Amino acid sequence: MSQPSAKRDSLRSLVRTVARLRSPKGCPWDRRQSHRSLIPYLREETRELEAALKKGKPHEIEDELGDVLLQVLLHAQIAREAGHFGIDDVAASLRLKLRRRHPHVFGRRRFKTAGEVMRHWGEIKAQERLERRRDVLRRGLARETR
């Protein structure tokens, strides 16, 4: 299903809006937020999304999903400003994680039932932890040799 250009570009525009809110000429409240200061708001928005999902009203779900998305974008913007990562990195990492965790969709393994998927989930997570430890060690060694 093809989306009109305005809707397709709305996510990129939203990312720019959040960056502007945090810019020197942006909102004083948004500028002073940190990962830590935003934790209560993330919790609150998540609870509100849960309530909307339980009600099952699409317009409320859409609104609350937007509020949770704002939290994600704020955290990604704060991290970008600190030189760590940005929303594109978050999206790329998530894409890779989804592909790793669904070898039955994107790879050669075949699971026919949700039960089979869940049985192999632990193996996939254990492999991710091992790879993450190796990556941390490699990065640590790379820093030491600089």
Image (cartoon, helix red, strand yellow):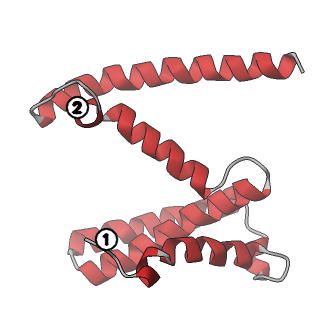
**Picture coordinates of residue 62 (x, y %)?**
35, 77
Q: CA distance from mark 1 to mark 2?
A: 33 Å
Q: Which element carries disc 2, helix, strand or loop?
A: helix
Above-or-below relation of 55 to 141:
below
**Which mark sits nearer the N-terminus, 1 or 2?**
1
- Name the element at disc 1: helix
The quadrant in which the C terminus is found is: top right
Location of residue 141 in the rendering, given as x and y in whole percent from the top left corner: 77, 15
| Front-lying residue, 21 or 111 | 111
The amino acid beneath tag 2 is His
Can you identify the residue that label 2 sits on? 104
The quarter of the picture where residue 124 lies is top left
The residue to which callout 1 is attached is 51
Q: Is residue 48 left or right of residue 136?
A: left
Pinpoint residue 67: horizontal percent, then vertical percent. 48, 73
Tell me what residue is drawn at x 43 percent, y 38 percent: 97
Is 144 on the left or on the right of 49, as rendered? right
Crowd around label 1: few <14 · some 14–19 · many ≥20 (10 Å): some
Which residue type carries mark 1?
A: Ala
